[in-house]
Image (cartoon, rainbow, N blue to C red):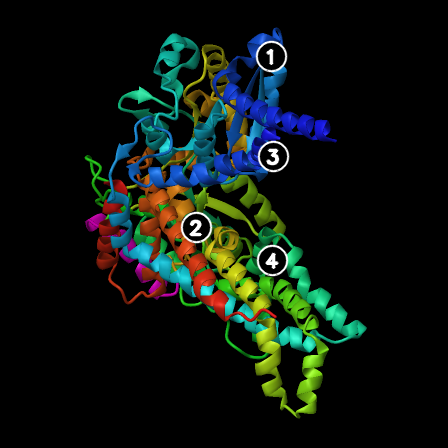
């Protein structure tokens, strides 16, 4: 029977080894690199201590990058969830039209982000794009969607929201359908007005789904890369440069691996704090039946 | 059942271990694979940037090389833009599976050489002095080949920017393209071309063009000791010219991501909305085709002069990656020699519009016939006597990005002062070049 003791470890060993080699080791390597000045290839890495972090935090461009990332994340998640909530309340009915719209709204989710980026680049083109053509039909002025520093980040948020809504709606509809009918029946007996029914039954019962969507929405948006790399390259005037693109740019275009790793460590810290926050604070407020 | 699970676990463990061991082995001894195979050809990989005509040219030349001999087999792989090519090469170097031969955009030669990613070719050239005939390379193109007096790259697909002109539109407005010699001529031609539907020139903010104007104004981008000097007199004068033209509405500057902005400028010119357009001579074949499709005549002229006539050269040099064993090095060298030989440079030039990088190639029948048939090809070669190297300091790619941003800021808000914008760019660049 003694042999049983080591058997569980043997069983989990492959998973643990893969986890250590591909997840834990790179994180520690990144932290190690963040204290060095290195160009990725030369044999000597110069130790610079906290130099990279000092440089990062005193760089106005990096602060702009953080600001862009937070703005992008906040508005993307806010609009994605609120629009998806409205959509799902509207679409949570039987009938071929509703299922058709559900399918149509979901379709962006299964398209590759690269194709989406190319598509929207054309839709939002200042001169030949679809959006501006529509605006000109109703007599409105052209909007330089992607080429003006004031509108570029908003345009990227629109694209992200468009992409998110389908998946978010699906999750919320599933949440709505799992709310027990007897709660509504009880509320009907008490003649509860609709808005109260929403605030006291629908919303609390949906909170696990909304909580889940908030988490994946934030984690997803903070790591945005594809659309930025393809559509704006962080421009114009740094207005759409976000953390992950900034890391890529410094590491792989400017060959500043130490500096990029330091930014990577900051991303890691932000993500860890957010995750902790969810599970410590927010999860207590989520209502599970 | 128990036995089966043990067996399964062990199999998985062994597979995992074997996979780990294997990847280490290929890192160190992957190069010797071909020896053990015996008499097969030596396999080498070649990475190149840009598709379309340029990509076809690369593929065709590699095919010619493979058919010509059976000692070496080259596989050509497309890697996107120069930036993408560079970052992929770098990542591949770190992973230990870099291509044997690749391209360096000429401003990056020093960065790659100093990082130890590329092979010093001096010894190869000395050994093969007669065959390679270094004197035959156009001296105007050699400025970006040496780092600390050692040769790191040979001129391959090289270019200069030239002015593309919609001749049909010029004729309608009664302007003679040949009359554009100085900055004033250039400005007034742009003025005459501009009306409600047309604009003189459409130009993206591209530091390559800015380098041209700064040098024409007698300034320098980077000083002798690697210090930033583009915010000097010449730089300010160059930017003021652009600013004046934007304010007068004779120059359109599309915004957005650099590649997109340059596509938009090209579109403006191709559709006849802009009368002039700056681009690499490498675009010539494509632009001739576009002009024909859109029904106008295309002409090319040199960049205008101010204090002096000057243009930066551009394009890519061929380099060999470092850390190869003797056999691969020899194979890579044979391939580089072939690609940069007079016959191939003439072929590439005629196919794309890139410069013939060898003097003897310019004199060859292929090129002379081409110049007679399509005189547009000749301009870049004539202009090359005014060609200069691009700055090669480490960190230049980042300087380019910062400068692009600051100039774009001015283009969006022409009430700013050119001098302030450039000072700001110079200050921000300090941390990039260190």
In the displayed structure, would residue B332 be above or below residue B88? above
Farthest residue in the right direction? A96
In the displayed structure, would residue A221 be above or below residue B216? below
2 or 1: mark nearer the eye? 2
Region of the chain picked out in magenta, as a range: B231-253
Which residue is label 2 attached to?
Answer: A245
Are the residues under badges 4 and 2 in a single subunit?
Answer: yes
What's the CA distance linking mark 3 and mark 4? 47 Å
> Counting other residues with Cα less than 10 Å from the Cα at mark 2, is it few (<14), some (14-19), or many (20 or more)?
many
What's the CA distance linking mark 2 and mark 3? 39 Å
What's the CA distance linking mark 4 and mark 2? 20 Å
Rendering quarter of residue A89: bottom right
Percent coordinates x, y for residue B293 in the rendering: 62, 50
Which residue is label 1 attached to?
Answer: B41
Question: In front here: B104 or B168?
Answer: B104
* Residues tagged 2 and 3 counted as in contact (Cβ below 8 A): no
Is B248 covered by the magenta stretch?
yes
């Amino acid at each position: 029977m003694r042999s049983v003791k080591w058997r569980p470890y043997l069983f989990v060993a492959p998973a643990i080894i893969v986890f250590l080699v591909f997840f834990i080791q790179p994180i520690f390597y990144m932290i190690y690199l963040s204290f060095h000045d290195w160009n990725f290839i030369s044999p000597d890495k110069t130790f610079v201590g906290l130099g990279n972090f000092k440089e990062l935090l005193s760089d106005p461009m990096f602060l702009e990058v953080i600001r862009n990332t937070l703005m992008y994340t906040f508005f993307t998640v806010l609009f994605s969830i609120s629009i998806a909530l409205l959509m799902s309340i509207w679409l949570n009915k039987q009938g071929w039209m509703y299922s058709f719209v559900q399918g149509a709204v979901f379709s962006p989710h299964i398209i590759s982000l690269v194709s989406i980026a190319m598509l929207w680049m054309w839709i939002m083109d200042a001169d030949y794009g679809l959006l501006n053509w529509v605006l000109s039909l109703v007599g409105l002025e052209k909007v330089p969607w992607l080429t003006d520093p004031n509108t570029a980040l908003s345009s990227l948020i629109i694209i992200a929201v468009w992409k998110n809504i389908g998946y978010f709606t699906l999750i919320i509809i599933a949440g709505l359908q799992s709310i027990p009918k007897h709660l509504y029946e009880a509320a009907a007996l008490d003649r509860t007005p609709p808005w109260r029914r929403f605030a006291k039954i629908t919303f609390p019962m949906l909170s696990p789904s909304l909580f889940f969507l908030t988490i994946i929405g934030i984690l997803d948006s903070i790591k945005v890369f594809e659309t930025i790399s393809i559509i704006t390259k962080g421009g114009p005037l740094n207005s759409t440069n976000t953390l992950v693109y900034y890391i890529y740019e410094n590491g792989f275009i400017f060959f500043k691996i130490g500096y990029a790793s330091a930014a990577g460590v900051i991303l890691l810290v932000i993500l860890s704090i957010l995750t902790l926050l969810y599970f410590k604070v927010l999860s207590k407020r989520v209502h599970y039946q | 059942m128990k036995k089966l699970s043990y067996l399964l676990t062990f199999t998985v463990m062994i597979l995992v271990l074997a996979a780990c061991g294997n990847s280490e082995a290929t890192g160190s001894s992957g190069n010797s694979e071909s020896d053990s195979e015996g008499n097969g050809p030596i396999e080498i990989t070649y990475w190149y940037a840009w598709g379309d005509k340029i990509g076809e040219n690369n593929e065709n030349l590699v095919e010619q090389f493979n058919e010509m001999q059976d000692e070496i087999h080259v596989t050509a792989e497309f890697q996107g833009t120069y930036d993408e090519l560079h970052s992929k090469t770098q990542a591949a170097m770190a992973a230990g599976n870099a291509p044997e031969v690749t391209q360096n955009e000429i401003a990056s030669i020093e960065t790659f050489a100093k990082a130890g990613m590329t092979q010093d070719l001096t010894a190869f050239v000395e050994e093969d002095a007669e065959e390679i005939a270094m004197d035959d390379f156009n001296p105007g193109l050699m400025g970006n080949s040496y780092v600390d007096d050692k040769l790191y790259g040979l001129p391959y697909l090289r270019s200069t920017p030239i002015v593309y002109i919609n001749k049909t539109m010029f004729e309608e407005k009664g302007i003679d393209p040949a009359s554009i010699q100085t900055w004033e001529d250039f400005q007034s031609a742009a003025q005459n071309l501009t009306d409600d539907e047309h604009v003189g020139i459409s130009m993206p903010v591209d530091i390559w063009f800015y380098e041209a104007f700064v040098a024409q104004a007698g300034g320098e981008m980077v000083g002798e000791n690697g210090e930033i000097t583009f915010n000097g007199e010449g730089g300010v004068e160059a930017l003021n010219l652009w600013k004046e033209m934007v304010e007068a509405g004779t120059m359109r500057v599309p915004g957005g991501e650099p590649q997109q902005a340059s596509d938009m400028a090209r579109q403006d010119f191709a559709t006849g909305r802009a009368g002039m357009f700056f681009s690499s001579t490498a675009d010539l074949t494509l632009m001739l085709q576009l002009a024909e499709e859109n029904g106008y005549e295309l002409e090319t002229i040199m960049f205008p002069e101010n204090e002096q006539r000057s243009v930066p050269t551009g394009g890519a040099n061929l380099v060999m990656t470092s850390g190869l064993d003797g056999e691969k090095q020899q194979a890579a060298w044979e391939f580089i020699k072939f690609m940069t030989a007079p016959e191939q440079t003439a072929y590439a030039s005629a196919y794309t519009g890139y410069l013939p990088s060898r003097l003897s190639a310019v004199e060859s029948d292929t090129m002379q016939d081409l110049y007679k048939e399509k005189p547009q090809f000749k301009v870049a070669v004539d202009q090359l006597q005014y060609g200069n190297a691009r700055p090669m300091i480490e960190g230049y790619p980042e300087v380019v990005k910062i400068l692009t941003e600051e100039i774009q800021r001015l283009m969006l808000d022409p009430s700013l002062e050119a001098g302030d914008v450039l000072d700001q760019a110079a200050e921000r660049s300090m941390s990039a070049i260190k």
